[in-house]
Amino acid sequence: MPRRMGMPSLTIEARSGSVPKSLNTSEQMWTPLRNLKDLAGAVVVRRVLNLSPLRKLGTMTSLHIDSQNKQIRAVLELRGEPTPIEVLLYYQVSSPRRIDILQVESSREWISSLINEVLTPDQRRLPVPELVSKLL
């Protein structure tokens, strides 16, 4: 039988009392699914944010979610800024309707300092729709 492109091979051996090592392909199998979930999540989150009241500040032109490493990378074109701003957020999902921003790196140093040093942990807790937290 021909092997399908992009799918991990799976060998099942009949032995009593043990699970063959070749059956342990969970990371290989889940990575493409996680990537698809992250891509779908990025599309949904970007669309929601660009339609929210935050749109008055500008537009999110790119959004990439890495749910395994709990990172969100975004490119923002904000009003009054001559060039796009790149932002990397490290987060954790703290409840079905809340995420906590743990740390921010930005192409604008003042944004990183504002979020990491000025805002309290309570101010870095963001309410989100349950669908968003599931995608993250």
Image (tube, rainbow, N blue to C red):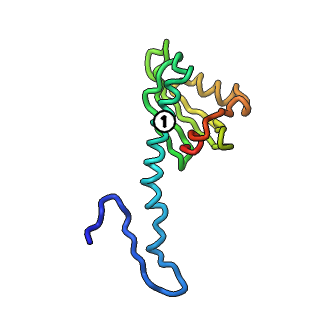
| The furthest residue to the left | 2
| The furthest residue to the bottom | 16
Q: Residue at x 46, y 66 (%)?
A: 25
Q: Quadrant of residue 106?
A: top right
**Camera-side residue: 115 or 92?**
92
Q: Relative to residue 117, is residue 111 drawn left or right?
A: left
Q: Residues within 10 Å of mark 1 (few under 14, many from 20)?
A: some
The residue under label 1 is: 44
Viewport quadrant of the N terminus: bottom left
Q: Relative to residue 111, is residue 46 drawn left or right?
A: left
Q: Secondary structure at mark 1?
A: helix
Q: Relative to residue 72, is residue 115 drawn left or right?
A: right
Total marks shown come to: 1
| The furthest residue to the top | 80
Q: Relative to residue 4, is residue 72 drawn left or right?
A: right
In the rendered view, tell whether residue 69 sits above or below residue 104: below
User: x, y percentage for residue 88?
Assistant: 53, 35
User: x, y percentage for residue 74?
Assistant: 49, 32
Q: Quadrant of residue 91?
A: top right
**Camera-side residue: 111 or 92?**
92
Q: Amino acid at mark 1?
A: Val
Q: Residue at x 63, y 43 (%)?
A: 92
Q: Residue at x 56, y 43 (%)?
A: 136
**Camera-side residue: 81 or 32?**
32
Q: Quadrant of residue 101?
A: top right
Q: Residue at x 46, y 34 (%)?
A: 63
User: x, y percentage for residue 97?
Assistant: 66, 39
